[in-house]
Image (tube, helix red, strand yellow):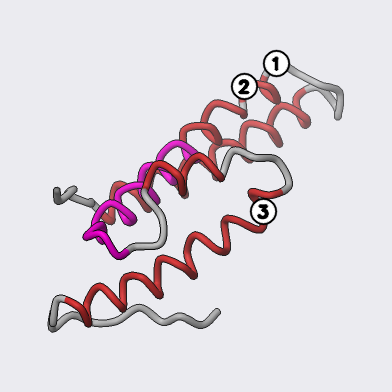
Amino acid sequence: MKHPVSKKFFALAIGGGVGASHLLAIAGMLMSRFEVSPLVPLSILPMSFAGIVLARLTYVAWASIQDGHARMTPSSVILRLFFPIYNVYWFFQVWWGFAQDYNEYLDRHDLDLSKISEGI
């Protein structure tokens, strides 16, 4: 099953969410002279939106290479990102592993597409 991906949407949603979150937090601190203001907790909302969009992008990426040979299912990839401390390690494994599996997917299906760099 193919999932359409809008690069512009994902870039704006993730970048905008992180940027708006930071702006709200800074504005809240400046308005209340470095005391906690209502804007600081409100900054969690755009950051949460960016996290949800990033999780969706990760799910769609892994779903696009499911042919019985991928090392993980999209659901298990996302689920492991919710374990504290382990998720820091897992985030890097998700994208490095995706690059490897994607390149193998291209080779298996003899597709003439650009491969993803497996390096940092």
From the image, tell me which residue sits under label 3: 88
Residue type pointed to by label 3: Val
SS under mark 1? loop
Amino acid on which the number 2 mark rests in the picture: Leu
The residue tagged 2 is: 42
Task: Specify few, some or many for label 2: CA neighbours under 10 Å numbering under 14, 14-19, or 20 or more.
Answer: some
Q: Are marks 2 and 1 in contact (CB under 8 Å)?
A: yes
Q: Quadrant of the C terminus?
A: bottom right
What is the x, y in percent for residue 29?
78, 30
Residue placed farthest to the top in the image? Answer: 38
Q: Nearer the viewer, residue 120 or 11?
A: 120
What residue is drawn where x is 26% and y is 61%?
65
Give the prevailing secondary structure in the magenta stretch. Answer: helix
Front-most of residues 2 and 5: 2
Residues marked 1 and 3 touching at CB (< 8 Å)? no
Residue 19, quarter of the rendered image: top right
78 on left or right of 112: right
For disc 1, the marked residue is: 38
Q: Nearer the viewer, residue 45 or 19?
A: 45
Identify the residue at image location x=71%, y=26%. Answer: 28
Residue 112 x, y percent position in the rendering: 13, 83
Reply yes or no: does residue 59 show up in magenta: yes
